[in-house]
Amino acid sequence: MELRNKTAIITGAGKGIGKAAAIALAKEGVHLGLVARNAQELEALQAHLTESFGIRVYYASVDITDMAAVNKAVAALTESLGSVDILLNNAGIARFGTVADMEPEQWERIIQTNLMGTYYVTRAVLPGMIGSNSGTIINIASTAGERGFATGSAYCASKFAVMGLTESLMQEVRKHNIRVTALTPSTVNTDLAVNAGLKIGDEDRMMQPGDVAELIMATLKLPPRVFVKAAGIWTTNPQ
């Protein structure tokens, strides 16, 4: 599928997978709406993308756990971009601890960001896609959404929920020619992983954000009549 002059909204766009995806889409001539909490990171990325690729780039600094703020941000971005062809739900946080030890507020924050944030942004973008009778939604889940592990209850619960949301939404909107995909990377060398205390190992051998961006691009370029329901990407030999 030709991507030039399509439009995309990316959450968690300031760094990591979101930033890598924004650069990959910009190279294809896709106009972008960038969403994240850090306005400074978004402004810098906007300047780089517009200067390097000559596309239209707009951004909204917003906490996706705030539904009213999300609705306002999406409305502003769609007013600038026009109809949205692609939504990449990438924003997420991770913290690890046992069920007994993790504070409930922290547990809830992970669910609010990873699940409810994905839901809020999707719900804000979806009516426009239904009206256009087309669109692609890609949710960045995780291998943690396929199997649980000790100390991962909050993160795993959030990503299992994203997988269920993706499956249900896909069944709802296929009739509108909207493609809905879940991608499940294993550990990626990002600030999220480092800040969560995950062992990254040799950076030359560890999965990089750009690797996930390549999978995103391959998924988007499929003919509109087909879509990837779910796909995993793993580091070949991280040790």
Image: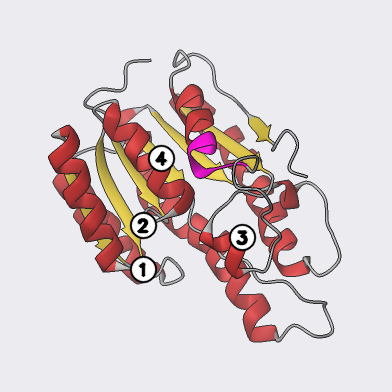
Please report contact status of discs 4 and 2: CB closer than 8 Å, yes or no. no
What residue is disc 2 on? 14
Q: Secondary structure at mark 2?
A: loop
Res. 157 visible in picture: yes
What residue is disc 3 on? 193
- The answer to whether residue 122 is left or right of residue 24 is right
Give the alpha-carbon distance from disc 1 to disc 4, as whole Å.
Answer: 17 Å
Please, what is the three-letter code of the amino acid marked with disc 2? Gly
Give the alpha-carbon distance from disc 2 to disc 3, as whole Å.
Answer: 15 Å
- At 45% from the left and 13% from the top, the residue drawn is 223
What residue is disc 4 on? 21
- At 63% from the left and 85% from the top, the residue drawn is 105
- The mark that comes first in sequence, 4 or 3, is 4
Tell me the quadrant of the picture where the N terminus can be found.
top left
- 13 or 132: nearer the viewer: 13
Please report contact status of discs 1 and 2: CB closer than 8 Å, yes or no. yes
- The answer to whether residue 219 is left or right of residue 185 is left
What residue is disc 1 on? 37
Give the alpha-carbon distance from disc 1 to disc 2, as whole Å.
Answer: 8 Å
- The mark that comes first in sequence, 1 or 4, is 4
What x and y, as percent, mark residue 141? Answer: 62, 48
- The mark that comes first in sequence, 4 or 2, is 2
Please, what is the three-letter code of the amino acid marked with disc 3? Ala
Q: Which residues are magenta?
A: 207-212
Considering only vertical position in the picture, is 13 above or below 116? above
Please report contact status of discs 1 and 4: CB closer than 8 Å, yes or no. no
- The mark that comes first in sequence, 1 or 3, is 1
Considering only vertical position in the picture, is 36 above or below 98? above
